[in-house]
Amino acid sequence: MTAKTPKESLTILTDLVLPGETNPLDNLFGGELLARMDRASSIAARRHCRRIVVTASVNHVAFSKAVPVGSVLNIEAKVSRAFKSSMEIFVDVWMEDRESGQKTKVNEGIYTFVAVDETNTPVAVPQIIPETELEKERYDSALRRKQLSLVLSKKMKPSEATELKALFK
Ligand SMILES: CC(C)(COP(=O)(O)OP(=O)(O)OC[C@H]1O[C@@H](n2cnc3c(N)ncnc32)[C@H](O)[C@@H]1OP(=O)(O)O)[C@@H](O)C(=O)NCCC(=O)NCCS
């Protein structure tokens, strides 16, 4: 299977925040943003492996800034690392200023998708070759996040999480 680069999976969803999608403060409802991020990362994962993909875990989401109604959001998702059947997807969310067009980062999320066949059995995915400094940084730290996610979901014993343990040495 030929390895791919993160940019081959790059997915950008651009959309408005409408009144029906907000909380009582007229800012984007968190669950609505999560759904949009899940959709973008699912497309990125699918572009990487060209298989059926399912969300295995949402590892981290940081709502750093509120997004007011009427905002234009750019949701950018890219595969940061591929393992055997699973892929880590980084999602960066940018708010676009209506007048200047300047972009401010408002949110970040890290998702794990697994490629499966028609019987929901995990299947192998292509490896990834990071290119930019940021892609290399995210690639290098992905195994640590995978182990943390597996430990939290009780699929790995803390004693087996070698990358995590190395952090505390
Ligand atoms: C995701 C799913 C297919 C994994 O199946 P499984 O029987 O646990 O399979 P495995 O244990 O072989 O794990 C498959 C891969 O997923 C990874 N994985 C499983 N759970 C994970 C978690 N919580 N966090 C990170 N990675 C996880 C495993 O490490 C493994 O990765 P690798 O093959 O790259 O090494 C299965 O749990 C599932 O179908 N879940 C429901 C998915 C779903 O409905 N999502 C929402 C709608 S799309």
Image (cartoon, rainbow, N blue to C red):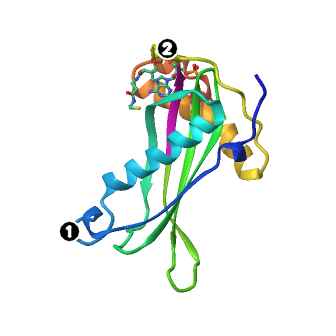
Can residue 59 be seen by looking at this rendering?
yes
**Considering the image in quadrants, where does the C terminus appear?**
top right
Confirm if mark 2 falls within 8 A of ligand 1: yes
Q: Secondary structure at mark 2?
A: loop
Drawn side of residue 19 relative to residue 82, left or right = left
Which residue appears farthest toward the left when viewing the image?
24
Taking the spot 65% from the left edge, 35% from the top edge, the residue there is 48
Residue type at the position of mark 2: Thr
* x and y percentages locating residue 92 in the rendered image: 55, 56
> Earlier along the polypeptide chain: callout 1 or callout 2?
1
Query: Magenta part of the protein: which range?
Result: 110-116
Can residue 169 be seen by looking at this rendering?
no
Drawn side of residue 40 relative to residue 132, left or right = left
Q: Which mark is residue 121?
A: 2
Taking the spot 59% from the left edge, 32% from the top edge, the residue there is 87
**Considering the image in quadrants, where does the N terminus appear?**
top right
Q: Residues within 10 Å of mark 2 (few under 14, many from 20)?
A: few
Q: Secondary structure at mark 1?
A: loop
* x and y percentages locating residue 30 in the rendered image: 33, 56
Residue that carries the numbered disc 1 in the rendered image: 24
Confirm if mark 1 falls within 8 A of ligand 1: no
Drawn side of residue 51 relative to residue 135, left or right = left
Taking the spot 74% from the left edge, 44% from the top edge, the residue there is 136
Q: Nearer the viewer, residue 129 or 101?
A: 101
Residue 154 among those drawn in magenta: no
* x and y percentages locating residue 154 in the rendered image: 40, 20
- From the image, give the main secondary structure of the stretch colored magenta: strand
What distance separates the C-alpha of mark 1 from that of mark 2? 42 Å
Position of 127 relative to 160 (above/below): below
1 or 2: mark nearer the eye = 2
